[in-house]
Image (spheres, rainbow, N blue to C red):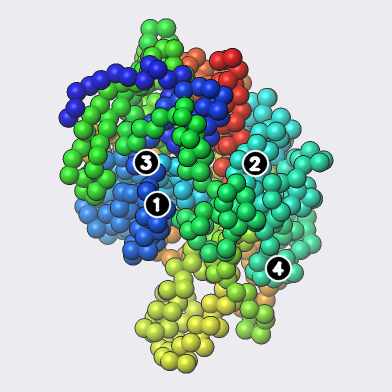
Amino acid sequence: MGAARRDGSEYDVIVVGSGFAGANLAYDLARAGNSVLVVEAGPGLPKSREDYIENFWLNTFKSPSSPYPPDDNASLSLAGAAAMVNAGRATVQDVVVTTDPAMSRDERNARTYLTYDTDTEPDYMSSPFASTWERVAGGTGNHWMGTCLRMADADFRLHDRHGVGKNWPSAITAAAMAPYYARAEARIGVSADAGEQRDHTDAWFPDDYEYPMPALDKSLVDRALAAAVNGKALTADNTEGARVSGTPAGRNSRPYAGRRACHGNTNCTPLCPIQAKYDPTVTLALALDTGKVRFMEKTVVDRVNIGASGKVSSIHYKQYEDISVPASTGVTNEGTLGTEDTIYVLAANAIENAKLLLMSPWKDRTAANSSGQVGRNLMDHPMFLAWGLGPMDGEPLYGYRGPISTAGIENLRDGAFRSGRAAWRMEIGNEGWNWPTGDPFTSTSDFIDGANASGINPSEERYLGSRLLAKVNAVLTRQFRIGFLVEQLPDPDNRILLSTRYQDNLGIPRPQVRYRLDDYSGKGFESAREAAGTVMDNMGIAAETRFFGVGNEDMQRFTYNGVTYNYQGSGHLCGTHAMGNDAAVSVVDANQKSWDHDNLYLVGCGSHVTVGTQNPTLTLMALAARTADAILARRS
């Protein structure tokens, strides 16, 4: 291990994390003349995107993490894998292990990065936290889907409007956020129709606003569903007629910012092979090109040091070299960075930011935690999936073409119902049954092997030759799926802690999660199931070819009112250092500055007070732009 050293005093700002918030803050601050150090726990930018694409091709288990290091299949094959990895992260494979009934809880925790309390709260493992993230240059933004929806005043004022949840700080309103949303949309390059968004969503736009690019074309699946449900009520508690509208997309509908237009690869998650979809590595490269930004990769910050003045005096880090699984070496160097004159920005994610703060002692608490709220109020959008086959005598839907999603139903996201049950937005999928069943592989294998894993070969008949071709064509061209992003309320008992048993290969505690879905979300799932049934009724989908409730074995489940529902994680880690007007009950202010430490900012979805139903990335980036302005103002 190398000798401890101290440097970083020459930097105006140190940013921990290079994802959506970190990369964009670094760029905004550097363009204004500030010297910035970006510290990334994972590997840096690859020599070529082809490296990631090849990883994905060669990986037999195709998941959102498959292209990115470290090898995400290790948790499936290597006992104790998580303890052998430098800078690990949660993966879909981890979730599969977590739900494996053949393993003991200790065996599962030994393999997975995200751990569960095995003694005092064993029931938390029955409905596990199902979202994943990356620790690599660009962060989880490498595998985001590209959905760019604005939040509305009803989401920012949930408690005022509906008597549940909490309100965001008074400074955060839809109108006040509009210029920051516009900056984020320009940085990303969002394709959408502003008129359609005004008409069919509850988001707010200036009258003259136009998106950077025209909307992407709606798919045949979108059009078929619109023809079936537009103007019709989907649930008994909300009689407003549904309206299918295009989804604002962080991908190019025409060449923009030096990137090509979308070619419809339906591979947006885990990566766009031609980078028509924006990801944070685009802005990270721009930041490095300013000459004002230095990048430190494979550098894990494990402590925030607080000086006698209450300001952050430095951060402590550990470095490593080996990204193999298992790693052949651990810590290769460690040291500290910065002084009390430095501005520090924690821009990891809601779980890693909370974990870092909980590892950092301060007075009788931990850093930034005078309110006791660090790590609490963990939220996601648990995703309820439904899928079916269009009628044999109907027009083919031709899935597996275009981006994963080009449209959804957004006009049913708010209403009086929200005082009693969770809201949802409905996403229309273009990728057939790939998400819920692993098709086209699973159904094709069923027809060849005489199996019924996908549920559409109940007689377990075998098909060969021209009969196989005809069967596959008949099935794959009629598949569609819909997904419901269900709202969660902030719950202080849903939280991130430090594991006292499990560490990574650097000797750093792994995060421990407590997470449950409450009755409010359960009622939202009931409503989503009702809506899915209405959609399928209106599309003429036969009872034997419609699927919702419990999906394949890799899905998580929870039971509400005697009904078992599947759910998937949306990758939307929110709420663990929430902002507010009052330091006694929140962690950061409306600028995402710590109430406790004047030179510390905590950015990202961890600052979100509520999650609404909209994918949170656009709001994350808009808030990062707002924070950049606040930092620049104090340095001017």
Q: Is residue 141 left or right of residue 200?
A: left
Q: Residue reaching furthest bottom?
A: 466
| Front position among marks 2 and 1 | 1
- Badge 2 crowding class, 10 Å Cα cut-off, few under 14, some 14 to 19, many 20 or more, is some
* Res. 49 visible in picture: yes
Residue under the point 67% across and 58% down: 216
The mark that comes first in sequence, 2 or 4, is 2
The mark that comes first in sequence, 1 or 4, is 1
The reply to whether callout 4 and callout 3 are in contact (CB within 8 Å) is no
Alpha-carbon distance for marks 3 and 2? 25 Å
Alpha-carbon distance for marks 1 and 3? 11 Å
In front: 514, or 582? 582
Q: Which residue type does callout 2 highlight?
A: Ala
Residue 628 drawn at (x, y percent): 57, 26
State the SS at label 1.
Answer: loop
- Badge 4 crowding class, 10 Å Cα cut-off, few under 14, some 14 to 19, many 20 or more, is some
Quarter of the rendering occupied by the N terminus = top left
Residue 78 drawn at (x, y percent): 22, 54
The mark that comes first in sequence, 2 or 1, is 1
Q: Which residue type does callout 4 highlight?
A: Arg
**Tag 3 residue:** 44
* Res. 500 visible in picture: no
**Tag 2 residue:** 186
Quarter of the rendering occupied by the C terminus = top right
| Front position among marks 2 and 4 | 2
**Tag 1 residue:** 48
